[in-house]
Image: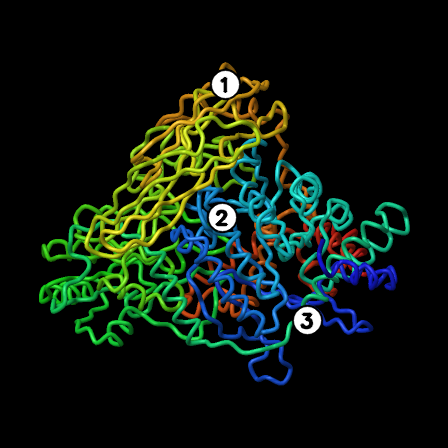
Amino acid sequence: MNPFRKKAQEIVAQLSLEEKANLCTGGDFWHTRGIEQFGLAPANLTDGPHGLRKQNDDEQSPDKGKMVPAVCFPAACSTASSFDVSLLEKMGQAIGEEAKAEGIAVLLGPGINIKRTPLGGRNFEYFSEDPFLTGQVAAGFVRGVESCNVGTSVKHFAANNQESWRMVGDSIVDERALREIYLSAFETVVKESNPTTLMCSYNQINGTYASDNGWLISDILRKEWGFEGTVITDWGATNQRIEAILAGLDLSMPGPVPAYTQELIEAVNAGKAPLETLNESATRIVEILIRNAQNKRSTFDKEKQHNLAGEIASECAVLLENDGVLPLQAGKKLAVLGGFAENPRFQGGGSSHIPTTKVTSVINALDEAGISYTYSEGYSSNEIIPDKKKIEQAVQTASQADVVIICAGLPNKFESESYDRKHLNLPDSHLYLIDEVIKLKKPTVVVLMQGSPTLLPFRKKVNSILLAGLTGQNGGAAIVNLLTGKANPSGRLAETYPLSLESVVAIDNFGERAVQYRESIFIGYRWFDTANIEVQYPFGYGLSYTTFSYKNLRVSKPILDHADTISVYVDVTNTGKYAGKEVVQVYIEPPKSETYRATHELKGFEKVFLNPGETKNVCINLPLRAFQFFNNATQSWYAEPGKYTIHISRTSRDPILSASVEIKGERQVVSDFRQKAPEYFTPHLGTKFSEKSFKEIYGKPLPIEMPIRPFHRNSPIADTRQTILGKLALKLAVSKLRNSFSEIGSSDADADEIQMLLDSTIFGLPFRSLVILAGGKLTFTQLDGIIDIFNGHLLKGLKKLKK
């Protein structure tokens, strides 16, 4: 039980009904309400997750309202590639210390949604396509932050896997896929790290908005997993306030929303919502206030944190190609090309964008290291169309060098919160520069700064490719250390790099308002490896400057019963000449099954440091759950009796050593879809999962999408663009909000980027969000009047607006 529970209950018992109801809605945009009579200040909730995005609320400061500079650590797309739980815990602790110094009660992160397709606009903020890896690294991060007496908010619960229509969309997922893929990481974090809060997503899950989803919040999260913390909404995600509190949702953000307070009071008085339910929600919120009151504002060492950000970035970079050019030999004449070398892309756009304390670029780091080079821009950081004059100058610079280093990747506008990507291509300006340099036949290294997979048509034409990812503010130092051999690349891909967008099966059902997850469990490597589809680079892939060998694989027992955990042991030796880290990956291949399953799944990993010639014995434990799938027929986790193969692998499709274990026990009834949904049993390139087959595995009628007209509270504002009034209103809203959105994006946001953020965010808002975001200046009755006017009922609407 939460150590503050008893005191919180005592306080709540002394509050009036109105005070309790008030607690369950935010006090302002970034704060809860406080309880002045008990000396409890409002709790400050601040965006993360790879640093703080705190708004200055000091009334005396000339910078009031601006974001406070903070240390930007590598984004989740990079930190997952470290395959290092302890590293994530260390990073979480560093951010927790900074949060404590800034008076933050809850960091709004980490984001642990699964990367269903590589087009997800916010994928850079999430860890992986694999739920096991996601759960493990996220649990480490949460433990680190919470060790500083600062809360976390694990988000976005659940099945929030695209930015398109994210506030009104419906993720239609069969329960097995939901349990195995999209809920699994949340379960791991809840059970292993006990986060302070969980944040519900905007979207619907199988026809019910996340905020109102009692099956998810109460039945699964609280009863099955034992979560005792607070469930909060994403900002503006509350659908129906009474349904939400009955579902188990405690805190609606932001505030104030007087209408919600009044609804809760009336519902309790009318017996529509039990007082005990309101008391429980208020108690959980008061626990946060009590905990926060214990923290004393302090200071933190910004330079130390900056250096740590660089150290972490060096652990996350993935060496994709290398024919011996790296590490760079001393004395070589270097040419450094590309605008990202001087103005790096090191974080994503949207609510996680952090105003940094400082930034170290590749150019800065080379200067600090005293390494000579010549630099030519080639393209500016936001330039998409090739500038032939710049590229000619860059090629001329490259022609005079012994080794060429090209910094390339994805500009801010290519991946951001609020909108999804349209393709997997790098900008033409970057590709053209690389192609022209290749013609020189000089040793060429490409450094990629990006948060999502891209197509790399040059991958076999250059000598080396280093995927730096989104490195955080000290990425330049990390990159230079890796290029020169001061650090040895040890990152492994946390997501597959496909050979084409068309080979991603989930892309057939992506981006719509109501999305059927017809591929079920077959996402990421579970799809590519099971269907035996060629990829650019598989999940778990990554090179090193040294080499490793494996031997002596053994398991602690050959037979596993239904209460056992087995241990897997293997000896790993550094057979090269450089010290380095190897990621030992364990995949489990199930026996022939009565249901559809992936050929193998990641169920364990360990990162180990080895000096040249050194051998270490690595032990990885596998609980029974590692062998199980979710059996819809019995509504339980089940490991079929039979022989399972344990693979020690370098990637998801590169087993080195294998051993077998047998599971014994009685067979359960399993839903047999072999006749009604055969494509799930023989997936291959070109497989199309039909709606007919999906209905079979879904097991119940599919949710019905509401028509666009007439407009209603959940209609996205985008739907009104077909009306004259809607066009005028949206034009006014865009012009008013343009300046504020430039800050949400990035310091170097251009007009196109700002417009994309505006279009996707404002146009995607449902009407009901206007009441939530209006801070008490708009009632739901008035909102209904506005909707009536949009529906052509002018007089009816005007009457409601006067109330």
Q: For mark 1, what is the residue?
A: 594
At x 76%, y 49%, the residue is 245
Q: How many labels does the image show?
A: 3
Q: In this view, does 667 lie to the left or right of 778?
A: left
Q: For mark 3, what is the residue?
A: 294
- Residue 450 lies, in percent from the top left, at 35, 56
> Badge 2: few (under 14), some or many (20 or more) residues near its Cα, within 10 Å?
many
Position of residue 365 relative to residue 532, above or below, is: below
- Residue 735 lies, in percent from the top left, at 54, 66
Whichever of callouts 3 and 2 sits on the residue coming sooner in the sequence is 2
Indicate the amino acid at tag 3. Gln
- Residue 331 lies, in percent from the top left, at 11, 69
Is label 2 in a helix, a strand or a loop? helix
- Residue 209 lies, in percent from the top left, at 66, 43
In space, the residues marked 1 and 2 are separated at their CA atoms by 29 Å
Indicate the amino acid at tag 2. Gln
Is label 3 in a helix, a strand or a loop? helix
Position of residue 346 relative to residue 418, above or below, is: below
At x 19%, y 63%, the residue is 391
Q: For mark 2, what is the residue?
A: 136
In space, the residues marked 3 and 1 are separated at their CA atoms by 55 Å
Whichever of callouts 3 and 1 sits on the residue coming sooner in the sequence is 3
Residue 724 visible in the picture: no
